[in-house]
Image: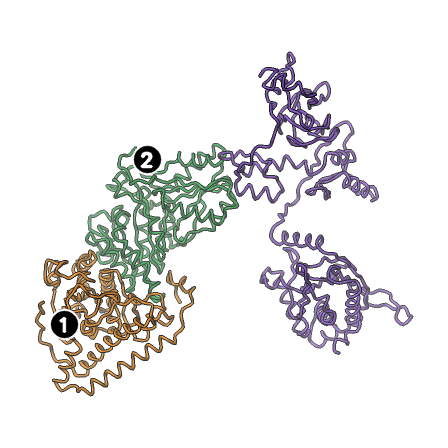
Chain colours: A purple, B orange, C green
Amino acid sequence: MSPDGPHGPSASNTRKIMSIDVLVPPLGQTVDTVTFVTWYKREGDTVKPGEPLFAIETDKATLDVESPAGGILRGITAQAGDAVKALSVIATITGPKEELVPKPATAGSSRVQETARNIHSAPVSPPPAQRIFISPRARGLAEREGASISELRGTGPEGAIVERDVRAYLAEHARRAISPVARRLAGESGLDWERLTGTGPRGQITREDVESAIGARNAVVEPATPLPRKPAEEGVAPLENRILETIPVAGIRAVIAERMLRSAKGTAPVTLTCEVDAGALVALRASLSADGIPVTYNDLLLRVLARALQEHSRLNASLDGDKISVWARVDIGLAVDTERGLLVPVVRDVGTKGLAELAAETRSLAERARAGTLAPDELRAGTFTLTNLGMYGIDAFTPIINLPECAILGVGRIASRPAYVDGKLEERKMAWLSLTFDHRLVDGGPAARFFQRVVQLIEKPHLLLT
Amino acid sequence: MTIAQSRPVSALATAEQLAMYRKMLLLRRFEERCNFLFMQGRIPSTLHLYIGEEAVATGVCANLTNSDYVTSTHRPHGHALAKGVTPRSIMAELFAKSTGCCKGKGGSMHVGDMSVGMLPAIAIVGGGIPVAGGLALAAKMLKTKAVAVSFFGDGAANEGAFHEALNMAAIWDLPALFVCENNLYAASTPIATAFKIQDIALRASSYGMPGEIVDGNDVLAVHEAAGRAIARARSGAGPTLLECKTYRQVGHSRSDPRTYRSRDEEAEWALLDPIQRLGARLIADGEASEGSLAEIEKSVIAEIDDAVEFAEVSPSPDPADALLDVFYEEA
Amino acid sequence: MSQMSIAEALRQAIREEMRRDERVFCIGEDIGVTGGFGGAFTVTLGLSDEFGHERILDTPISELGLTGMAVGAAIGGMRPIADVQYSDFLFLALDQLANEAAKMTYMSGGTLKVPMVMRAPVGATARGAQHAQSMEAFLSHIPGLKVVAPATAYDAKGLLKSAIRDDNPVIVFEHKLLYGSKGPRTERGALSPVGEVPDEDYLVPIGKGIIRREGKDVTIIGKLLTMYRALAAAEELAKEGIDAEVIDPRTLVPLDKELILESVRKTGRLVIVEEDNLTGGWAGEVAAIVAEQAFYWLDAPIRRVSAPDTPAPFAPVMEQFYVPSVERVVQAVKALF
C-alpha cells in the first residue's frame, strides 16, 4: 500500500489531520519488548486524555498506560498476549469525524509500515451482527462468571467458543476486578485487595473501596501477622497463600448464601433489642421437667411467640410483590445448626399445640435436620423464625430475616446478672432478645409493641394461661 | 359344501350334555349381547364374534381342567368362556375397566385368565400355535400331565408358525392338541383360494401326527373326538390335528357386511346351528323339555345381565396405569 | 478364579444355572448334537453330555417356531435359553419376540411372566451381509424386552446368569469376534479377550454400565467390539494429551443413563461408537438422551461413529472400512477440541 493510499491527497486535503499515534512507552534502557495485556477501551470508543487506555506487562510489573489525547480510538493492532516493542504504534486516536490516513513511511521503521498496512482506510464501524457459536457449557460458564460473550474468541471446533476460551477470558479479565488506580493504590499501601468487596460496576473494587479499607486498617490495631510489605523498588509480587481447604459454594451452602444475600439486600431490616428477666421461664422449665415433661427454652419461646403473633398478626406476615399477606396460622421456623449448614425446619400451627407436643416435634425436627432427612416441605413456608444462639454464649445479635417472612427473633444466653428488683439489687437470670423486622412491612411502633408482649409473656408465663 | 361324517358318540351323561348346552348358550348370548352393546356405543372394543362356532370351544374345553392350557386367537370370547373365564371379567375387559381379566390392558382380542389355564389370547394369526407348543413342552418337562390346546382358524394353517410348531410338537411328542376351526373363510378369503386341498386335517400327515375331521357344529362329536386326542396327548403319545368344520354365522369383525359370501350359504348353515341341534336332540331323547331349556335360557341371560352390570359399575383404570406391567414384578 | 474366553464364560453360566435350577434348558439349532459344534460358536459345546438332549434341545431350522416354543415354555413354568445362530435370523423370530414375548405380561395386566432368554451373535466377519447384522437397535426399541451386551468374560458369565434369573424376556447380544471360540470355529481376526472369571456364583446386575477407563476430556461409549475400539482409541488419544473416559453400558435396556450423564457432565464431550448402521442406530438414542438431559454441560456437538448405511460388505478391505476403526474414533474425538 503506497503512502498515498486509496484516499490519496485529494481526500485528505479538505481536512486538518488530527490523529495521534498511541505508542508503547519506553520503559528504561534495558527493556525492549513487553507483553501487551489488555485494552481498557474498545475500537471506536471515545477516550479522554489521561484516562487509562491499556496495560502492558514486563517481567517485573504490570503498568497502566494513559491515553495521550482525546478522541476516538481506532486502528487497534495489539491483542492480549502480543509481544510489542517499545515505541511501536499500536493504535491511533482521531478526531470525531476523522478518517485514518496512513503516515508517510519512515525509513527503517518496518513496524510503522506494518501498522500502516493494518490501518483501516474507511471509518471503522462495528461488524454486522453475526451469530455467535458458543457451546452450552461455555455459555453457562460465561453467564455465571459474568464474562461478556461478545468479547470471547472461539478456539473450539469450527471456531466455536468453548469452555477453555471462557476460562482464558476470565483469567485475563480477573485483573478487571479492580480498577487500575485502585490496584496501584492498594499495591503502594501493601493492602491485600483480593479480599475486598467492590462497590463499583460488576463488583469492581474502586479507589474509594481501597481508600476506606486502608483507613479501616489504620484505625485497627495491627494484626499479629502483618501484611507483607514489598520493597519500594520492586513491583508488587503476588500474595501467595496455601489453600487449607476449598469448599464449593454448592448444595446447602449455595442456598444459604443466596438467601442471606437476598435478605440482606432486599429488606429494610431494623433490629430491636431488649433485656428480659428469664427467671420465671427458667423456673417453669424446671417445674415441667420435674413433672416429667422435659422441654427446651425454644419450646417455651415457641408458645410465647405463637400467642404474641396471634395478637400482633402484622408480624405474622409475608411480603409478596405489592401486597402483604397476613397469615392465619402461626408456623415458626426453628434455626438448627447442622454439619452441612444452617437449616430451618418449620413447626406448623404452633398456636394449637401443647408444650409436650411441641417438645416432641422440635426434638424430631432437630434430629432429622442433623441427619439430613427432612422433607422439602418441612423447610419452607414458615411465617416467623426463631434463632437461639444462647448455647454459644452470645448475648445480642442481628439476625437476618428469613425471606419472605416479616420478622425473626434472636435469643441470647440466659446469664446471671445483677438487676434491680423493686429497688433492690439482686442476682437475676437475664437474657437479651434481638428482634429484626422488615420495615417495609411493619413500622417500629407495632414491632415494638409485639416485642413488649413477647417480653411480658416471657417474664410472666402464667399469662399464657389466660 | 361337504360335511364330514360324525362319528358315533359314546353316551354322555345327561348332566354333562345339559352343561354343554348351557355353555354353548352362554357363549351365544354373550356374543349377541356384545354385539348389542357395541352397536349402542357402550363398549370401545372392536369385536370378533364367535357366533355359530360354539360347539367347538365347548366340546373341546369340556375335556379340560384348569391345569390344562388353551391358546386362542383374535376371536377368543368363546374359548375364554368355555375354558372358565368368568363373563364378568371378560365383559369388564371389553368395557375397558380395571376389573377386566386383563385390567383393561388387553381388550377383546387378548382376554384370558391364567388361573383357569386360558392364555391371554394372541391376535397375530398363527402366533399362538408355537406358544401352545411351548406350553406343552413345559408340561412335558415338568411332568404335570397338562395338555395344551391351540385353537386357530383355517387361515392360520398357512402361517409358517403353524408348520414349524406342528413339526416340532410331533418330533417331541408333545402333549398338545391343535384344533383348526375351519369356518371356510379367513376374514373374507374363502378356503378354496387359499388351499389346494379340501381338508386341512390332511396336513397332519406331513408332520407325522394323526389328523381327524369332525363336524364342528355337533358338540357331542367334538367332545368325543377332542376327548380322545387329549387323552392321547396326556398319555405321552403326542399331538393331534383336529379339524372342526364349522361356520361363522356373523362377519369377520363388526365392520363386515359379508358381501363375499351368499345369504343362501348362510341360511344353509343356520339350519345346522349347534345349539338348536343339541337342544332338539335333548328333547328328542327326553332329557330336556322346552320348559327346562327356557329355564336354562333365563339363567344364562341373568348371568350375562349380571356381567354387564358388573362391568358398568366397575371403575375405569387410572390413565397412568398404562405405564405399569411392562416388566413382570413379583407382587 | 479362572482365565476364560467369553464362549467359555457363557458356557459356564449356562452350566451353573442348569445345575442350580431344573427349569432352565437350552433350545436352539445345532446346540446339543453329539459330536456337533455346540452351537454356531461353541458356547453349548459339551453341555448335552452333562444335561442330555432334552435339556439341550435341538430344533429343526425353525426360528419362529422355536422362539414361540420358548415363549410358551416360559409362560408354562420353565426358564428357556433360546438362541439363533446369527442375529440376522432374529428377523424370522421377530413376531414371537415383539408381539408375544414382549407384550404378554403387559396385555395380561401383569398376571403372567415370560422368563426366557434369547442369545444372538452379532458382528461382521467376512461372511457377507446376511450373517453380519447388528440387531441391538431393533430389539432395544421394543418395550417389554430387556437387552444386554456383555463384552468381557466376567460380564458374559454374570450377565447371562442375571438374564436367566430375570422373570422377563432378555435378549443377550454376543459378538462373534469376542467369543474366543477355538478349534474349527476359530474366527479369523477375532479379538478373543480372555479375562478372569470367578469360579463361584456371582451376578452382574442388569441395568448397570461400567467405566472401563476414567478420563476427563471426553466420554467415549462403545459396546461389544467397539468398546475395545474405544479403549484402543483412548490409548492413542492419551499420547496427544487427550484424556478419554470409556464407558461400556453392558445393558442396553434398561440403560444406565445416570452413569453416562454423570460422565458427560464431567467431560463435556461425547462420542458414541457402534458397529451398526448410522441411521436409527442405538447411538442416536444415547445422543438424544444426552442432548436432552445434559445439554448445558456440552462443550462440543455429540458425535456418532457408526457403520455406514449399507449392508455389510464381504471383502475384508471393505469390511474394515465398514466397521468403525480405532482411527475413525480418534479422528472423531479430536474434531471435538
- Camera-nearest label, 1 or 2: 1
Q: Nearer the viewer, residue C70 or A109?
A: A109
Q: Which residue is at a point 35% across and 77% down the rendered structure image?
A: B310
Q: Indicate the quadrant where residue C281 lies.
A: top left
**Residue A2: image x %, image y %?**
59, 15
| Secondary structure under the numbered disc 2 in the rendered image | helix
Task: Say which residue label 2 marks.
Answer: C320
Specify whether B163 is left or right of A110. Answer: left
Amino acid, disc 2:
Gln
Of residue B112 and residue A52, the one placed in the foreground of this image is A52
Q: Residues within 10 Å of mark 2 (few under 14, many from 20)?
A: some
Amino acid at dot 1: Trp
Residue A28 visible to an observer of this rendering: yes
Q: Is residue B32 above or below residue B243?
A: below
How many C-alpha atoms fall within 10 Å of the one at disc 1: few (<14), some, or many (≥20)? some
- Residue tagged 1: B269
Question: Does residue A174 lie above or below B98 as drawn?
Answer: above
Along the line of sight, which residue is nearer the eye, B208 or B187?
A: B187
Q: How far from the left and from the top, in percent, is residue A357?
A: 65, 73
Q: Position of residue A350 (x, y in %)?
A: 67, 71
**Which residue is located at x 60 percent, y 31 percent?**
A125
- With A324 as the anchor, is B191 left or right in this view? left
Q: Residue furthest top?
A: A107
Chain containing the residue with disc 2: C
Identify the residue at image location x=25%, y=40%. C127
